[in-house]
Image (spheres, grey):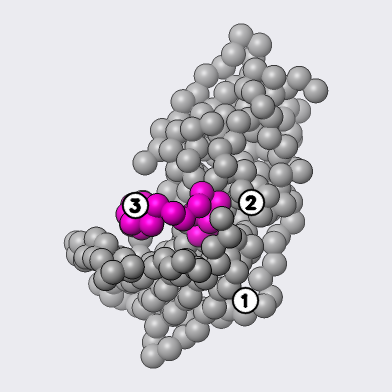
Amino acid sequence: MPEPSAGGSAHEDRLDLSAPATPAMLDLVHSVLEKLWEQHEDVGTADRIRFETAVIEVLGNIVEHAYELDAAPADVLRRFDVSLSASDEELVARFGDNGMPMALDLSEVAMPGEDAESGRGLALAMAALDDLSYERVDGRNLWRLTCRRRD
Amino acid sequence: MIEFAVETTAGGIGVVRPQGRLNMSSARRLKEIVDGLVSQGTTRIVVDLAETTFLDSSGLGALIGGLKAARQAGGDLRIARPTEAVRTVFTLTNLDKVLRARDSVEGAFDA
């Protein structure tokens, strides 16, 4: 079982993590975010909440999608990497994963009806963020999340 | 990284306390707990969110599913004492009107 590599290696203002795309990794990313806040104590609570909410929703989407309609043999491991950074102006997360391509048009993402029990993930991430982008490059899904600091 | 404390009050109200992060790993357990209470006849349920440090869309889905199950059985599900992180998610998804947060567990079914 491959272990997550570099459980938050620091490059000045950046934290990087590479790990298998499994639900258990959500808690690991929460831990890396805690480390980011320790390094940036000046980031306000509301900004932390918005950013953490969006990061976990996008990761949840990656993990779910990694196992969906996946024609790859079972021994092909789906992995993701994430880079988290904070500056005076913004909080940025970059995700990359080798999962299946997403048939995704972010401009069509909408909040589902009040009684829906699923389908809110990306809409919630977009509501929490100032910018979310997705692209498929060289067989990898790339996500960039930006949260401008407000408090 | 979550625990659920469950009790039934003398008034017959089920109280569920998710302690930790309510996310895609733990949402199913919340739904199972609520379904279990409803099937035992406890259809009035309060989810006390005072110790719920994080909520994601899966956790929200479990709360909405629990609300529907309780109402279909003639009861209701209410939320109480949400943390700032939880309140933010309700606001961002426009569900703060559907599941209005109550100030206390004891008073959650008053009015």
Q: Residue furthest bottom?
A: A138
Picture layout, residue A16 above or below residue B14: below
Evaluate if marks 3 and 1 touch, with contact meaning CB atoms under 8 Å apart.
no
Residue holding disc 3: A38
Q: Nearer the viewer, residue A76 or B63?
A: B63
* Residue B59 lies in the magenta-colored region: no
Q: Position of residue A93 (x, y in %)?
A: 43, 69
Q: Earlier in the sequence, mark 1 or mark 2?
A: 1
Evaluate if marks 1 and 2 touch, with contact meaning CB atoms under 8 Å apart.
no
Q: Alpha-carbon distance for marks 2 and 3?
A: 34 Å
Q: Which mark is residue A117?
A: 2
Residue holding disc 1: A106
Amino acid marked by disc 1: Leu
Q: Is residue A148 left or right of residue B74?
A: left
Q: Earlier in the sequence, mark 2 or mark 3?
A: 3
Can the viewer see residue A49 in this picture? Answer: no
- Helix, strand or loop at mark 3: helix
Q: Nearer the viewer, residue A79 or A66?
A: A79
Evaluate if marks 2 and 3 touch, with contact meaning CB atoms under 8 Å apart.
no
